[in-house]
Amino acid sequence: MDNTEHSDVAEENIIPASYGRTHVTTILEKFDNFPLYFDDVEYPSGTDATTRQGRGRLLLSPQSKSDYPDDDAYGAAWVEHGFAQ
């Protein structure tokens, strides 16, 4: 596959992973291409941590939001409700 092409990943092949803020910060700093796709990480806190069952997400970069306009809303919904929604 040409590196300039985008490909889709089937939802059944996406598995959530748990990483702390330190890990994500390290990835953002050490991998040059990672910030092209993600800006930061959002973790639940306080009562959100209970209602979200600990779900957090990587926040899309402006370019990723432009390239994949539905992904930000999907990620936000997943954080709030999980895959069941």
Image (cartoon, rainbow, N blue to C red):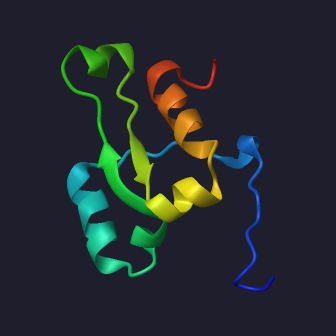
Vertical side of 47 occupied by 79: above or below = below
Residue 82 drawn at (x, y percent): 54, 24
Kindly identify the residue that appears in the image at 27 percent across and 59 percent down: 23
Residue 14 drawn at (x, y percent): 64, 46
Kindly identify the residue that appears in the image at 33 percent across and 49 percent down: 41
Is residue 19 visible in this depiction of the protein?
yes
Quarter of the image where one finds residue 61 = bottom left
Depth order, front residue of 26/5: 5
Q: Which quarter of the image is occupied by the N terminus?
A: bottom right
Question: Horizontally, is 29 left or right of 51 in the view?
Answer: left
Residue that extends furthest to the right in the rendered view of this protein: 1
Vertical side of 40 occupied by 16: above or below = above
Residue 34 drawn at (x, y percent): 43, 71
Kindly identify the residue that appears in the image at 39 percent across and 69 percent down: 35
Depth order, front residue of 84/61: 61
Vertical side of 19 occupied by 31: above or below = below
Q: How many marks?
A: 0
Q: Which quarter of the image is occupied by the C terminus?
A: top right
Kindly identify the residue that appears in the image at 64 percent across and 18 percent down: 84
